[in-house]
Amino acid sequence: MDGKIVITCACTGAETTKAQNPALPVTPEEIAEAACEARRAGAAILHLHVRGPDGRPTQDPAVFRKAIGLIRAKCDIVIELTTGGAVGDTADERLRPVAELEPEMASLDCGTVNFGDEFIVNTLPTMRRFAAEFRARRVRPTLECFDLGHVHASRLLIKEGLLEPPYHYGFVLNVPGSVPYSVENLATFRGAMPEGARFTVMGIGKSSLPAQYGAIACGGWIRVGFEDNVYYAKGRLAASNAELVERAARIAKEAQLEIATSDDVRSMLGLGR
Ligand code: ZN
């Protein structure tokens, strides 16, 4: 370990609503404000979803372009676009923003999974197509794994030469209908990664805080934000994404870890190269 921990903020997501937390940033302006507040609180990466004028999730590159422009004018946070999109989006829709905007990072879902009563479909041919597109455009993937099989599927892509190091994984735990968060499950996912890979832990819902401690204990990185969880504590909504980032930074510092800057991430993950 290099003694630095990276905090990602997933400030909006596709499924969270203002009814769940009125402080949810939805417009490009609100998202840019939330992203830069999160940056000041210690987040080095922004995991970005955008919404259309109706507040519903969209993969329209024009909306991403607007949000990215506003963020870039205010702060240096590394931007990781979603290619997970929203439940029901086609692969073409999900991939479009990466193809048109060539961000520094983007998420790459590594398999099919239950998502509450819905499901997310990622066949191996879809994953190969995404990985090839990312590689051609020098976009660093966050290999999102909701299930242990997804970690192994990513290794298949590595074997096929479609992914290049340094590898960065995102372990998404506690999605209803998939793998619950536990230290044991996290350790199993971690053990299945290629040696030397980095990983960020995302605990959904009430597992968010335990997953942050789990990440610290296992040498991983942290993700917080309204995409994953809208509460600060039981029965108390988070006032903002930044409030969640501030706490993550505080507990990491108590563990004697240094909070990585966005430029640290660019160098650790070889972004843009
Ligand atoms: Zn997302």
Image (cartoon, grey):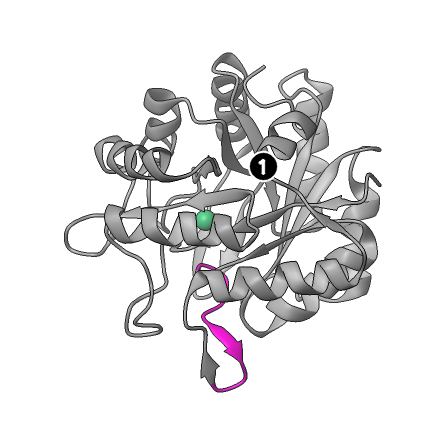
Would residue 174 be seen by someone viewing this image from the given angle?
Answer: no
Percent coordinates x, y for residue 180 in the rendering: 66, 66
Look at 53% across and 55% down and name the residue there: 41
In this rendering, the answer to whether 77 lies above or below 167 is below
Q: Which residues are magenta?
A: 227-235
Give the secondary structure at mark 1: strand
In this rendering, the answer to whether 171 lies above or below 211 is above
Q: Amino acid at mark 1?
A: Thr
Would residue 220 be seen by someone viewing this image from the given angle?
Answer: yes
- Image quadrant holding the N terminus, namely top right
Q: Is residue 158 rendered magenta in the image?
A: no
Dominant SS of magenta comes to loop
Percent coordinates x, y for residue 40 in the rendering: 49, 51
In this rendering, the answer to whether 95 lies above or below 187 is above
Look at 79% across and 47% down and name the residue there: 190
- Image quadrant holding the C terminus, namely top right
Residues packed near mark 1 inside 10 Å, few (<14), some (14 to 19) or many (20 plus): many
Taking 253 as reference, is 240 left or right? left
Residue picked out by circle 1 = 142
In this rendering, the answer to whether 6 lies above or below 215 is above
